[in-house]
Amino acid sequence: MLPGNVYNYGAAMPACLTPSTPQRPTTRKGELRCAMEAELQRRSAAGLSAVVIRAGDFYGCGSGSWLDQAIARDLGRGAISYPGALDLEHAWAYLPDLARAFVAVASQAAAPRWQSLNLEGHTLTGRALVAAIEAAATDLGMRPPRGWRLRALPWGLMRIASPFAPMLRELLRMR
């Protein structure tokens, strides 16, 4: 069982993805994901049972996600950073929902040896996500006296630091 992502589809992916959407990776991470899935599919033809469930950016159940490491990192200081255009939709996957999907697939009595599935998750604009974060933080008593500040990620600074920070280099590639 492999929790997949949308890297496989590449930068020109259509608005609606299905398991049969052609995969045209445009990054090394996308190429690696395609290779991993192809290997699982090849091995399933030889007897292995395998499933990939692709999902949007993960969040929930701990730290380490794009949401807490970049977007909501400075909530305590009254700031939210959004990495892209606020009017574009972005797909998110709540990890407990993804786990329930894997349990449901694993409990199928007559599952095929190879399955490639997509988890619908939550798709919303950057503006809607920022508003939801602000509302949740306000409900928790975190509203700053002067209101929330919205800022963009410092892509220029990240570009300068990227030769020395592999994580920043990868973020720039995936941007």
Image (spheres, rainbow, N blue to C red):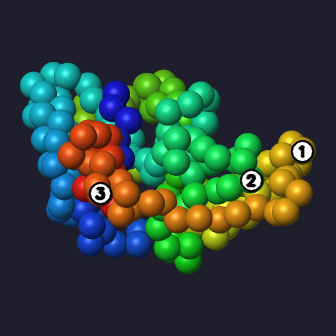
Quadrant of the frame with the C terminus:
bottom left
Q: Along the polypeptide, which appears first: circle 2 or circle 3? A: 2
Q: Secondary structure at mark 1?
A: loop
Q: Which mark, residue 159?
A: 3
Of residues 10 and 69, the one nearer the viewer is: 69
Q: Secondary structure at mark 3?
A: helix
- Residue 82 picture quarter: bottom right
Q: Is residue 74 left or right of residue 49?
A: right
For mark 1, what is the residue?
141
Q: Along the polypeptide, which appears first: circle 3 or circle 1? A: 1
Of residues 114 and 126, the one nearer the viewer is: 126
Q: Residues within 10 Å of mark 2 (few under 14, many from 20)?
A: some
Q: Is residue 62 above or below residue 75?
A: above
Q: Amino acid at mark 3?
A: Arg
Q: Amino acid at mark 1?
A: Gly
Report, in whole angstroms, how far the alpha carbon at label 2 lies from the one at label 3. Answer: 25 Å
Report, in whole angstroms, how far the alpha carbon at label 3 lies from the one at label 1. Answer: 35 Å
Q: Is residue 83 left or right of residue 138?
A: left
Residue 4 visible: yes
Q: Is residue 139 above or below residue 37?
A: below
Q: Which mark, residue 78?
A: 2
Which residue appears at 18% of the width and 36% of the height?
36
